[in-house]
């Protein structure tokens, strides 16, 4: 048996399955959305690329010692390295009371490339790094020249004036 389809007349109401829009199709973008959506995506991608390519985080501290050493060579400055962990109460005290002191931050920002090595996670990489660099306890602070030679070590808590004195001494040697 052969079926014949009667073509719809222009006066017929649209049906769901005819030549009209599929109700399951995504909505079509209007003219403004068609221009703005690619522009917004392009700006978001550019922002992500800039963030990923930045050498140091926004706070100025490198999280990789070797990147900090490379930056120190370019800047012709020594590297101040802080070994710390989130779970360490003395580390939090050092950050809050010493490293945030205006005289300390001014000296560190002006005279050093900064690196913060986070030992919050006890990973094999962190354990190897701690053993290689001689960091048995935290908090610890080291100063290296741009070639990676250690100029000084300071372990535990100190006052802002003690830290500034120690930093000056490492710069003289």
Image: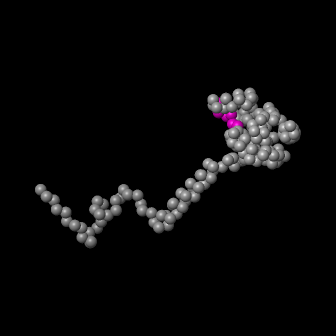
Residue 93 appears at what percent x and percent y?
Answer: 77, 37
| Residue closer to the observer: 15 or 103 | 103
- Magenta span has 51? no
Q: Is residue 59 above or below residue 151?
A: below
Residue 165 appears at what percent x and percent y?
Answer: 87, 39
In the drawing, does residue 119 fall left or right of residue 98?
left
Tell me what residue is drawn at x 77 percent, y 38 percent.
Answer: 144
In the rendered image, the quadrant that contains the N terminus is bottom left
| Residue closer to the observer: 82 or 76 | 76
In the drawing, does residue 47 fall left or right of residue 80?
left
Quarter of the image where one finds residue 138: top right
Q: Is residue 17 visible to the viewer in this orientation of the structure? A: yes
In the drawing, does residue 136 fall left or right of residue 158?
left
The mark tally for this picture is 0
Tell me what residue is drawn at x 35 percent, y 58 percent.
Answer: 23
Among all residues in the image, which is located at the extreme bottom? 11
| Residue closer to the observer: 106 or 77 | 77
Magenta residues, start to end: 117-122
Tell me what residue is drawn at x 19 percent, y 63 percent.
Answer: 5
Residue 64 appears at what percent x and percent y?
Answer: 68, 40
Q: Is residue 7 above or below residue 115?
A: below
Quarter of the image where one finds residue 125: top right
Tell me what residue is drawn at x 78 percent, y 46 percent.
Answer: 76
Q: Is residue 157 visible to the viewer in this orientation of the structure? A: no
The secondary structure that most of the magenta stretch takes on is loop
In the rendered image, the quadrant that contains the C terminus is top right
Residue 142 appears at what percent x and percent y?
Answer: 78, 35
């Amino acid at each position: 048996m052969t079926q014949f389809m009667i073509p719809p007349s222009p006066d017929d109401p649209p049906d769901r399955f005819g030549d009209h829009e599929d109700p399951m199709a995504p909505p079509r973008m209007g003219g403004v959305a068609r221009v703005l959506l690619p522009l917004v995506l392009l700006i978001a991608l550019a922002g992500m690329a800039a963030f990923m390519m930045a050498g140091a985080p926004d706070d100025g501290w490198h999280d990789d010692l070797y990147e900090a050493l490379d930056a120190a060579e370019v800047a012709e400055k020594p590297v101040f390295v802080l070994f710390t962990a989130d779970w360490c109460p003395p580390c939090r005290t050092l950050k809050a009371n010493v490293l945030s002191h205006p005289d300390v931050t001014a000296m560190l920002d002006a005279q050093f490339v900064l690196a913060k090595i986070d030992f919050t996670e006890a990973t094999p990489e962190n354990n190897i790094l701690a053993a290689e660099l001689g960091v048995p306890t935290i908090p610890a602070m080291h100063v290296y020249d741009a070639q990676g030679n250690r100029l000084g070590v300071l372990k535990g808590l100190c006052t802002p004036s003690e830290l500034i004195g120690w930093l000056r001494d490492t710069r003289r040697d």
